[in-house]
Image (spheres, rainbow, N blue to C red):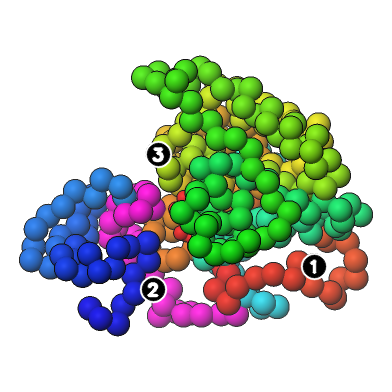
Amino acid sequence: MDAYWMPFTANRQFKKAPRLLAKAKDMHFWTPEGRQILDGIAGLWCVNAGHARPKIVKAIAEQAAELDYAPPFNMAHPKAFELAERLVQLTPAGLDKVFFTNSGSESVDTALKMAIAYHRARGEGTRTRLIGRERGYHGVNFGGISVGGIVGNRKTFGPALGGIDHIRHTHDLARNAYSRGVPAHGAELADDLERLVALHDASTIAAVIVEPVAGSTGVLLPPQGYLERLRAICDKHGILLIFDEVITGFGRLGAPFGATHFGVTPDLMTVAKGISNGCVPMGAVFCKRAIHDVFMTGPEHLIEFAHGYTYSA
Ligand SMILES: Cc1ncc(COP(=O)(O)O)c(C=O)c1O
């Protein structure tokens, strides 16, 4: 147990009393001793369709045997295109372009870069500021911890990205405690974005990123009308709205995405986790066609978006 340094874990405590999971099927894990455990959090909110489904296991085995790896830069394999076509059938109308990543953190950093590069490509290079929300979780890469709003994930790692600000969180126990469903109070908290526009000017702001339902400092539902208001303020000021749907995507709210469930369509949408049922590390960024098309100008032999990962797609 000595060599492995575990993520987001109290390592010394864990190693005194390890919690090991050796096997999984459907909604259960088994310990190495054979004790069955109900998987109440679907892995890490990612095994949306249950563990070890024969169809998925077979697909992974067949793919590894047929084509284990193909480079995604300047080359591709047919199934990446096929998957993209199938995925955009699920997304809200308009979000019909997809860029593949390997994790939620990578999806977030990809979306933030896309937002800044989009404005620059349109001749608005001053729009570089990124706005997150207090209590937000957007993974652990430098972009994600910068726009994220969880102090424990931020305080240790220096200033991270510059040009960041945060709107207020929506957790309002005084007014919304014990309410059922989506809280009645707090739509006006979206107006906090107007405060930041007044402070920084819209011409400096590229994007706002929020989780439709925040999932890492408690499950925080958006107040009634809040997401609609945020959408309207972004539209008014030409700011891109990014929904981080790494948890809420692929059925967790009973609809394909939070955007579908709440009826509010962002400009960019980050996903991971449920996209592959947790079976292979994978994520994606969906964006509106108009955003993608801004990149597709310039000479055709040049790379339009200088970004990607060895395992993208
Ligand atoms: C909303 C949200 N964004 C991003 C991430 C980061 O995803 P990953 O751990 O795959 O990098 C998570 C992970 O829980 C998340 O909940």
Q: Is residue 152 left or right of residue 72?
A: left
Q: Earlier in the sequence, mark 2 or mark 1?
A: 2
Dividing the picture into quadrants, the one containing residue 192 is top right
Q: Which residue is mark 3?
A: 218
Report the front residue among 311 and 106: 106
Q: Is disc 1 placed on a helix, strand or loop?
A: loop
Please say if 215 is above or below 118.
Answer: above
Looking at the image, is mark 3 or mark 2 nearer the viewer?
3
At label 2, the amino acid type is Glu
**Label 1 crowd bin: few (<14), some (14–19), many (20+), radius 10 Å:** some
- What's drawn in magenta, residue-wise? 43-71
Q: Is disc 3 placed on a helix, strand or loop?
A: loop
Report the front residue among 85 and 128: 128
Q: Are marks 3 and 2 in contact (CB under 8 Å)?
A: no
Please say if 150 is above or below 142.
Answer: above
Q: Residue at x 83, y 61 (%)?
A: 296
- Does the stretch in magenta take in 310? no
Identify the mark at residue 304; answer none if there is no mark: 1
